[in-house]
Amino acid sequence: MIPFRGATYTEQSRMVLGRGATLLAWDLFLPGREASGECFAFTRMANALRIETAEGPLAVEDWELTPDTGGIETAARLGPFTSHASFYICQSGPAARWRELLQQLQSISSKQSQLLPFWQCAKLALTGRPASAPRKVR
């Protein structure tokens, strides 16, 4: 999401995973069109995401930002950061496989603060196929 000045936006996503399904999902929120001077110039941004299986919820994310109420830079909101990203990796499988993937992702995060290397590593590890960069990242 890249909101424009005065925007009011709500995104709701629900993903239900079948048995043995793999999910690699990311969502990125930017503060606005910074080149146009529209950093946090939106009115309201909200996101509600739910990932579930037949057994119940795996992840529930629900947030709202309203810059006019002040304090958007507080630790409870965005702190010193101007963007927010969520990256979900879900698949049923042996715990050892997950520990190995976690170590790989931690190695990446200590070197870079980008979603693309996480995406590439996780997709290759879980599906055996290389990841293509999303349209806006190329």
Image (cartoon, rainbow, N blue to C red):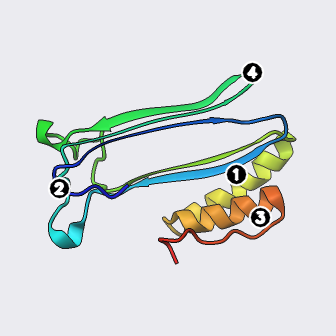
- Residue at x-position 17% and y-position 40%: 71
Give the camera-side residue of 61 and 79. Answer: 61
CA gap between label 4 and label 3 equals 27 Å
- Residue at x-position 26% and y-position 59%: 32
Pointer 3 local density, CA inside 10 Å: few below 14, some 14–19, many at least 20: few
The residue labelled by disc 4 is 55
The residue labelled by disc 1 is 102
The residue labelled by disc 2 is 5
Label 2 is placed on what type of residue? Arg
Label 4 is placed on what type of residue? Glu
Upstream in the sequence, badge 4 or badge 3? 4
Pointer 2 local density, CA inside 10 Å: few below 14, some 14–19, many at least 20: some
Label 1 is placed on what type of residue? Leu
Give the foreground label among 4 and 1.
4
Q: Is residue 46 visible?
A: yes
Upstream in the sequence, badge 1 or badge 2? 2
CA gap between label 3 and label 2 equals 38 Å
Label placed on residue 124: 3
Q: Is residue 57 left or right of residue 94?
A: left
Give the foreground label among 2 and 4.
2
CA gap between label 2 and label 4 equals 41 Å
Question: For residue 44, which quarter of the picture?
Answer: top left
Q: Is residue 76 visible?
A: no
